């Protein structure tokens, strides 16, 4: 029996849902929860701010130097005071539940080597007045324009190089300088998406710490943070005149669509993501869903004749705009050979032909090099005739300075690599041990122009919730900008990073283990509902959601398979437990053989069992099949592994599943990661609970998913898997007990969930032919073989035709397998006449069942070949 | 001298390739000493698309894609080119190499700035202090740059053994230096790394050698495949070629096809292939005098 796996799962262990344990902060506040609700401490804030104090030498966002809240904070801090510790803890529980429920994590689906980390959000937002934000925004927009001009020049006339304003090294030494990018003509932008990390110095002025010009990330997290905090402080956000972000994202979406070349009416926009193994995949998926654009990975896109297409189950679909998240150095393996499979061969050619717009075009990352910062003021003067309105952090490039390591004397300074892709972490120079300094000097002297030294500034501080009180910690802000027409729009908000302690520095990269905060821009007056100002034209009615990408179809097919596989395995496990409860060890053989057929048990494990195994023996055998903690002992397949795959696939298909299905899978993950029981009998309620989850999942799949192509693949997957199990089980039963004794039949009926139906139809203990008719032939039984085939027949008819033009009436090869089996079940009814012997009937049936079991792998292969072909490329 | 060139590239795949993209840089370039004749690129099976363009470095390149499933791909290029003889260069009259180095760092004149791009490390030609040391034996104080380059070329010819079995396309320069052996591509990358480690501008040149030598002369090494050599920049003089594999300055026997920072910029044929399994590659080059 084949036990096929989803191709994505071939390597590595499956990811499992987050552990259920709550952080200590929650359990602490839980105890006093009811108390605070019934008798809130009036006005006192019960010590929420008691230990909060600003830090010497740093600007405090919350308190002014006299120790009273700054004007922007007055209202909000009053509200916090009103909530008190306990109230805040209680409100925040809601936020933490949302975080958990939405499965928000950074590197949600990363590989084994990286730890999956839940997204760390602080309930206290950073606050900024509208007027301060307006002036800061103007400076950020100005900086975006500056970078746009610099990039256009670097990929165009290179006036800045010719005039000596930019040393050639800063362009030509950069590994991500893209020699295949065509120049941008006229007034068009090269930099469409831009983010900038800024921090506030001790004197309250702003400084730019880093520029993100390639494929900035974080806006999705900022959006998610906002949605969660809006749930935590529902009225507060409104009362404080918080400026909403929806309009920004609406306009971002409009910009993406407006980039389609050649005035296309219905352009196809995709987000090109590095895929589930990448750290930022969660955010890509989240943002794509929010923007209503297709999320694609490299292998889903193909270039034909200098045009980009998305592979769908209905054929190739033209793509006009790509919102790029794949790194620029691996974007086109044809131009720059790479081992990465994330890119799209031929993409640069399509860009040069002007058939597709890529945002940002690959190559804009050169502006992220800190070595460019010292040259900005002069370039700004040259291009705009004025200074930058906010400075960059003081930076010295090794190409300018003889003694780079001594270039910022008396200051706390960092040594960073100037260019490169996999940067070594910065080195803090003033606290560096002498020995390390020597080797560093040698490294830097060998190639000074590969390094910069950067001043380390004191970031401003703001209140961070520790779980029991507020503490003052350093903050850094990432603002997001998107081109709109010939200017830039700034997202009203930011992804604020807060350090993990008062002394630490906030990590700017999302890799860094720092917390995050939302930034609230507080309007002077109430904001009109911005959404209403932008009413779209009247929509015409449509019922399709567009073509289904081959990969989504594949994922849904495997969601169907894994969910059914898990369910059927659980049914078999439950049957084993029930048999042991009644001490019917003779019934075990076909059940264990079925688990073995699907790789959950090995032949050796089964052989090692005593003739009449004890309950303890069986418990030891089954524990690794169902419980995650025990599954690590075995090398075989396990239900936790299946659930892990299900979880992973479901997160890839969240936009096509119901919200409930997501929750059910998480709940199921919790169930299999619970600690295993000590007796076999206590496994029973756990397995029954598992079946309840499955019923819920099946229910939501039937009742909450639109009947579109995606649903067809989900259902086909489920039916195929159920046929596999049913055939295996019945064949194993007949193998172990060719006569099919009543107790074997009872087992089969029980797993098939038709014990009661049988009893209603027939009296007495089950007989082979009537029982098999119910399990295999009866199309009214939703768990019968006939029913599965009938569903497959219907779904296969509804799949896109191989050849759209001919609408060919010839059924597919896969379909013919189904039709032949259906025909058999409809016409070759089991005969209970006295003339035919029961044994002969069973023998004939077995031939059919074995034959069908042999053909099913061909069915899957044929279907996969037609709809999901995955091919990896190699360089030649 | 007029030449007729046939360059054949044959890929054989273990299993069918479902579709593929390729880029080829096979057409001899236009240089002060070279004029292009006809050029034809024949791809079998026939490609769905074929377009010709000029790349970043000014080389002619051809992009093509195939969606016909195939287990064998044959790329034939037929070109004609006329090469004028090299005018004698007085190597001693070039600037001292240190002066060239400083000009490349500071000059804002267009040709110097364009050459500056070739002073930086590239994927296959890294900076290495050991190589700078090796080069300094030729680049002694105040030696004219082209004189020193010629000396470096002769030393590489003497110190390194031509041996196709020691290296592969992926062998790094450091290993070539360690083994003191390789093929034209390795010697070129090595020489470029030496020169760039000193702060000089050096380019990688791919091209052909005439297959049959003139009467009475020995056949050049590398004449049955693509050849490679280096080109070195000197202000006012421009680019001058040096072929360490044969210890000569490229003259009428060398046909210039493409110029880049290293092999990766200008590989004659490369592609991205979907499916196919393991592949074997065969290349044949014939350069004959055109009557």
Image: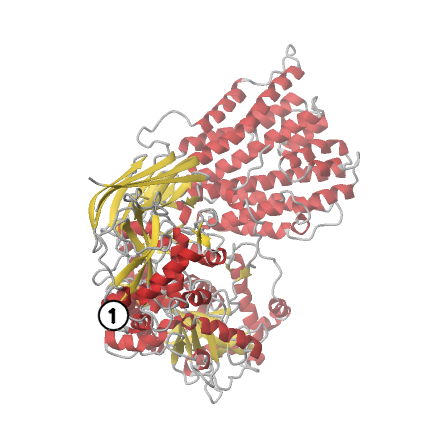
- Camera-side residue of A110 and A649: A110
Q: How many marks?
A: 1
- Camera-side residue of A667 and B265: B265
Q: Is residue A747 above or below residue A563?
A: above
- Find numbered disc 1 in the image and state the secondary structure of the residue it sits on: helix
Q: Residue at x 55, y 37 (%)?
A: A4
- Camera-side residue of A682 and A519: A519
Q: Position of residue B77 (x, y in %)?
A: 28, 41
User: Is the residue marked by circle 1 packed among few (<14), some (14-19), or many (20+) residues within 10 Å?
Assistant: some
Q: Position of residue A597 (x, y in %)?
A: 63, 34
Q: Residue at x 57, y 18 (%)?
A: A829
Mark 1 chain: A
Q: Position of residue A271 (x, y in %)?
A: 38, 53
Q: Is residue B216 left or right of residue A561?
A: left
Read off the residue under disc 1: A162
Quarter of the image where the N terminus of chain A is located: top right
Quarter of the image where the C terminus of chain A is located: top left
- Camera-side residue of A19 and A869: A869
**Quarter where residue A799 is shown:** top left
**Quarter where residue B215 is shown:** top left
The figure's colour scheme reads secondary structure
Residue A58 seen in the current view = yes
Q: Is residue B108 left or right of residue A550?
A: left
**Residue at the far bottom in the pictured view:** A66
Q: Residue at x 44, y 84 (%)?
A: A202
Residue A523 seen in the current view = no
Q: Position of residue A661 (x, y in %)?
A: 52, 48
């Amino acid at each position: 029996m084949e036990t096929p796996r989803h191709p994505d799962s071939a390597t590595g262990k499956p990811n499992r849902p987050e552990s259920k344990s709550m952080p200590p902060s929650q359990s602490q506040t839980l105890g006093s929860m009811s108390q605070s609700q019934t008798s809130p401490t009036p006005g006192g804030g019960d010590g929420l701010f008691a230990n909060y104090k600003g830090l010497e030498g740093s600007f405090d966002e919350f308190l002014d130097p006299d120790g009273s809240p700054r004007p922007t904070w007055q209202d909000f801090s009053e509200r916090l005071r009103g909530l008190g510790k306990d109230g805040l803890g209680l409100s925040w529980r809601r936020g933490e539940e949302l975080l958990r429920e939405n499965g928000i994590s950074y590197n949600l689906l990363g590989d084994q080597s990286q730890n999956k980390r839940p997204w760390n959000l602080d309930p206290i937002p950073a606050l900024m007045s509208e007027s301060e934000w307006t002036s800061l925004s103007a400076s950020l927009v100005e900086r975006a324009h500056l970078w746009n001009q610099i990039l256009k020049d670097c990929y165009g006339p290179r006036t800045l190089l010719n005039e000596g304003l930019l040393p050639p090294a800063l362009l030509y030494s950069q590994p991500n300088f893209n020699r295949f990018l065509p120049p941008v003509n006229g007034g068009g932008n090269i930099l469409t998406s831009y983010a900038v990390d800024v921090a506030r110095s001790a004197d309250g002025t702003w400084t730019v710490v880093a520029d993100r010009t390639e494929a900035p990330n974080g806006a999705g997290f900022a959006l998610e943070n906002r949605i969660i905090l809006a749930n935590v402080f529902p009225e507060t956000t409104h009362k404080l005149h918080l400026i909403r972000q929806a309009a920004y994202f609406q306009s971002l979406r409009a910009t993406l669509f407006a980039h389609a070349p050649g005035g296309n009416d219905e352009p196809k926009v995709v987000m090109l993501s590095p895929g589930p193994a990448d750290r930022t995949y969660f955010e890509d998926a989240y943002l794509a869903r929010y923007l209503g654009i297709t999320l694609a990975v490299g292998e889903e896109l193909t270039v034909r004749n200098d045009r980009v297409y998305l592979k769908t189950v209905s054929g190739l679909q033209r793509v006009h705009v790509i919102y790029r998240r794949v790194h620029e150095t691996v974007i086109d393996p044809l131009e720059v050979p790479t081992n990465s499979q994330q890119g799209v061969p031929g993409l640069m050619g399509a860009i040069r032909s002007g058939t597709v717009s890529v945002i940002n075009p690959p190559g804009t990352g050169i502006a992220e090099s800190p070595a460019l910062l010292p040259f900005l003021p002069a370039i700004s003067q040259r291009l705009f005739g004025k200074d930058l309105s906010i400075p960059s952090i003081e930076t010295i490039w090794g190409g300018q300075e003889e003694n780079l390591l001594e270039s910022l004397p008396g200051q706390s300074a960092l040594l960073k690599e100037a260019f490169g892709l996999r940067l070594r972490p910065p080195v803090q120079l003033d606290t560096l041990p002498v020995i390390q300094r020597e080797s560093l000097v040698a490294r830097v002297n060998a190639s000074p122009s590969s390094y910069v030294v950067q001043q380390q500034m004191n970031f401003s501080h703001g209140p961070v919730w520790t779980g029991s009180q507020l503490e003052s910690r350093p903050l850094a802000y990432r603002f997001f900008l998107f081109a709109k027409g010939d200017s830039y729009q700034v997202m009203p908000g930011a992804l604020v990073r807060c350090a993990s302690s008062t002394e630490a520095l906030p990590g700017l990269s999302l890799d860094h283990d720092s917390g995050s905060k939302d930034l609230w821009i507080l309007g002077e007056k109430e904001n009109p509902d911005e959404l209403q100002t932008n009413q779209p034209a009247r929509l015409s009615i449509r019922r399709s959601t567009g073509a289904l990408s081959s990969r989504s179809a594949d994922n849904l097919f495997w969601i169907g398979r894994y969910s059914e596989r898990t369910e059927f395995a659980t049914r078999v496990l439950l049957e084993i437990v029930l048999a042991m409860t009644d001490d019917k060890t003779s019934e075990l053989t076909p059940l264990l053989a079925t688990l073995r057929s699907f790789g959950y048990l090995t032949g050796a494990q089964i052989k090692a069992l005593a003739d009449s195994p004890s309950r303890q023996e069986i418990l030891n055998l089954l524990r690794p099949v169902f419980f995650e903690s025990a599954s690590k002992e075995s090398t075989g397949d396990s239900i936790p592994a299946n659930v892990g795959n299900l979880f992973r696939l479901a997160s890839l298909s969240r936009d096509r599943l119901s919200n409930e299905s997501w929750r059910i899978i998480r709940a199921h993950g919790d169930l299999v990661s619970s600690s295993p029981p000590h007796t076999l009998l206590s496994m029973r309620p756990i397995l029954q609970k598992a079946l309840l989850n499955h019923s819920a999942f099946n229910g939501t799949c039937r009742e909450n998913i639109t009947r579109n192509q995606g649903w067809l693949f989900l259902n086909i997957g489920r039916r195929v898997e159920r046929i596999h199990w049913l055939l295996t089980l019945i064949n194993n039963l007949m193998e172990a007990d060719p006569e099919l004794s009543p107790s074997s039949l009872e087992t089969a009926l029980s797993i098939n969930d038709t014990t009661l139906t049988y009893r209603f139809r027939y009296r007495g203990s089950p007989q082979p032919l009537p029982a098999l008719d119910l399990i295999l032939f009866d199309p009214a039984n939703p768990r019968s073989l006939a029913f599965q085939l009938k569903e497959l027949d219907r779904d296969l008819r509804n799949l896109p035709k191989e050849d759209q033009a001919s609408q060919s009436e010839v059924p597919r090869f896969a379909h013919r397998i189904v039709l032949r089996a259906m025909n058999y079940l409809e016409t070759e009814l089991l005969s209970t006449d006295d003339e035919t012997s029961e044994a002969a009937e069973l023998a004939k049936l077995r031939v059919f069942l074995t034959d069908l079991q042999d053909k099913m792998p061909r069915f899957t292969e044929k279907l996969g070949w037609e709809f999901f072909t995955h091919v990896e490329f190699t360089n030649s | 001298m007029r030449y007729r060139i046939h360059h054949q590239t044959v890929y054989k795949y273990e299993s069918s390739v479902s579709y593929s993209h390729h880029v080829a840089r096979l057409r001899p370039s236009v240089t002060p000493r070279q004029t292009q004749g006809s050029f034809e690129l024949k791809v079998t099976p026939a490609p769905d698309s074929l377009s010709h363009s000029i790349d970043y470095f000014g080389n002619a390149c051809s992009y093509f894609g195939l969606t016909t499933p195939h287990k064998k791909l044959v790329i034939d290029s037929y070109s004609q080119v006329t090469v004028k003889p090299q005018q004698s260069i007085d190597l001693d009259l070039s600037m001292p190499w240190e002066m060239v180095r400083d000009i490349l760092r500071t000059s804002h004149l267009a040709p110097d700035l364009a050459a500056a791009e070739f002073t930086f490390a590239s994927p296959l030609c890294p900076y290495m202090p050991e190589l700078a040391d090796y080069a300094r034996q030729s680049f002694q104080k105040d030696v004219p740059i082209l004189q020193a380059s010629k000396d470096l070329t002769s030393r590489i010819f003497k110190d390194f053994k031509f041996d196709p079995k020691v290296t592969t396309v992926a062998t790094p320069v450091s290993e070539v230096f360690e083994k003191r052996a390789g093929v034209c591509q390795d010697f070129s990358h090595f020489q470029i790394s030496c020169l760039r480690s000193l702060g000089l501008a050096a380019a990688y040149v791919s091209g052909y050698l005439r297959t049959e030598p003139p009467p009475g002369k020995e056949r050049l090494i590398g004449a049955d495949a693509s050849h490679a050599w280096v080109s070195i920049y000197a202000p006012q003089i421009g680019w001058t070629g040096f072929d360490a594999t044969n210890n000569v300055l490229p003259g009428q026997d060398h046909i210039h096809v493409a110029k880049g920072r290293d092999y990766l910029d200008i590989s004659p044929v490369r592609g991205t292939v979907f499916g196919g399994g393991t592949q074997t590659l065969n290349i044949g080059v014939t350069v004959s005098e055109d009557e």
